[in-house]
Amino acid sequence: MTTSKVNLLDLNRRDLEGFVAEMGEKAFRATQIMKWIYHEGVTDFAAMTNLSKALRERLAERAEIRPPAVALDQASRDGSHKWLIRLDSGNCVETVFIPEPDRGTLCISSQIGCPLDCSFCATAQQGFNRNLGVAEIVGQVWRASRLLGERRNGGRLITNIVLMGMGEPLLNFANVVKATDLMQDDLGF
């Protein structure tokens, strides 16, 4: 899917503040929008009822909130989940949730395939396709959080995030750093 709209999952707080400033809005609007996206799981601007109708309409013209879709959900008896996440390009990456009594670890991907060709790694046998963008990295966390029912049930199931899915995160450094910044933001997850 090709679009000229900005996917707000690509923007950290500073970038979103800049985006709304370009629209003539004050920085606090970015805070409101981030709470809707990350705390409430909203992807439709019309549902952001503390924003004016005019702003919601302008946002819908210029932006979107487009997390990746789930192609496959495999659940284990112990509560573990392995999701095959389908990206807009049609490629898929893996995201895994591992619950333990004292924590919940989400393992996310940073690349489609991997260029390192490590003999012990199944991903290496796929070859390398490309680095994931910020929205594709953050979108895995957004999607897992929704599927696990976080915030709705008042609980925090995901306590740790590791970049040990598909790919070598340090070879996608800029996007991983920006995604990590967003994940650590209080307005994020």
Image: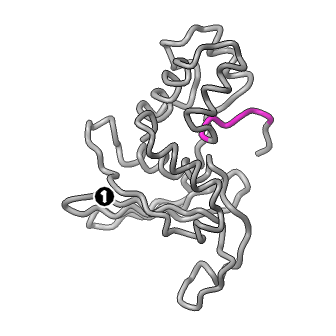
Mark 1: which secondary structure?
A: strand
Q: Quadrant of the C terminus?
A: top left
Task: Count neighbours of disc 1 (C-alpha within 10 A) and say few if under 14, some if 14 to 19, many if 20 or more.
Answer: some
User: Which residue appears at 59% of the width and 64% of the height?
Assistant: 93
User: Which residue appears at 30% of the width and 58% of the height?
Assistant: 104
Q: Nearer the viewer, residue 72 or 6?
A: 6
The x and y percentages for residue 142 are 48, 45
Classify residue 63 by image quadrant.
top right
Q: How is the image coloured?
A: one colour
The x and y percentages for residue 90 are 71, 58
Classify residue 87 by image quadrant.
bottom right
The x and y percentages for residue 83 are 48, 61
Magenta region includes residue 138: no
Q: Which residues are magenta?
A: 4-9
User: Which residue appears at 57% of the width and 53% of the height?
Assistant: 177
**Residue 141 horizontal side relative to residue 133, left or right:** left
Q: Quadrant of the N terminus?
A: top right
Q: Which residue is mark 1?
A: 104
Numbered label tally: 1
Magenta region includes residue 7: yes
Query: Label 1 sits on what residue type?
Result: Gly
User: Which residue appears at 68% of the width and 22% of the height?
Assistant: 60
The x and y percentages for residue 181 are 51, 46
Q: Nearer the viewer, residue 125 or 134?
A: 134
Whether residue 58 is situated above or below residue 147 in the rendered picture = above
Whether residue 116 is situated above or below residue 110 in the rendered picture = below
**Residue 38 horizontal side relative to residue 102, left or right:** right
**Quick one: which residue is furthest to the bottom in this view?**
119
Q: Nearer the viewer, residue 147 or 183?
A: 183
